[in-house]
Image (cartoon, helix red, strand yellow):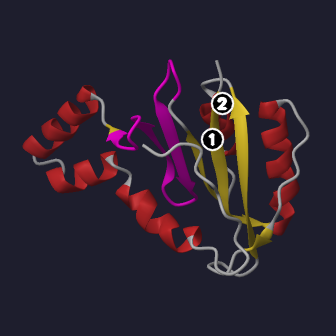
Amino acid sequence: MTTRGVLYVHAAPRALCPHVEWAVAGVLGVRVSLDWIRQPAAPGTWRAEFSWQGEPGTASKLASALRGWHLLRFEVTAEPSAGAEGERYSATPELGIFHAVIGMHGDILVPEDRLRAAMQRAGSGEADLQTELSRLLGKPWDDELEPFRYAGEGAPVRWLHQVV
């Protein structure tokens, strides 16, 4: 069983670009050469997109291989497949990594125990429920990555494989 997905490197310092390629190649087991273009949202950084295909769990392995690298902003997605939900990982230097399970229609699926924990923190006055739910949906990561997602002129186009 295989799935496919996309690695979006939103911003990486030039010196880190070959290391990103080596890390991705190590996970996929094939040579990887990304098409790097300048990232206008952060002068001095580069961006790339890479479509991949692999076993379910590959998105998790890619995110693990790239997490914790200072100044690297990235997202990894995996499409839902016959035996597995989709996934999305988002990472920024300030926020760390966010993981979401994605249903077949593109919705974020929040596990019951995470909802209960958010309600408990809000009920005890530890946190605001709206803020907790916002974090469960990845809004802080989306807010931080949005300026980097728009690549400007010369950005590659990604064709959808399946439209639901």
Pointers 1 and 2 in contact (CB under 8 A)? yes
Query: Reading the chain from its start, which is encountered first: label 1 or label 2?
Result: 1
Work out which quarter of the rendered image holds the C terminus and state it: top left
Q: Which mark is residue 5?
A: 1
Q: Which residues are magenta?
A: 81-108
Disc 2 designates what residue?
58
For the residue marked with disc 1, what is the amino acid? Gly
Is residue 98 on the magenta stretch? yes
Q: Residue at x 73, y 76 (%)?
A: 154
The residue lying toward the viewer, choosing from 33 and 18, is 33
Q: Residues within 10 Å of mark 1 (few under 14, many from 20)?
A: many
Q: Nearer the viewer, residue 76 or 15?
A: 76
Residue type marked 2: Thr
Q: Is residue 122 left or right of residue 113?
A: left
User: Residue 88 in magenta?
Assistant: yes
Q: Helix or strand or loop: what does disc 2 sit on?
A: helix
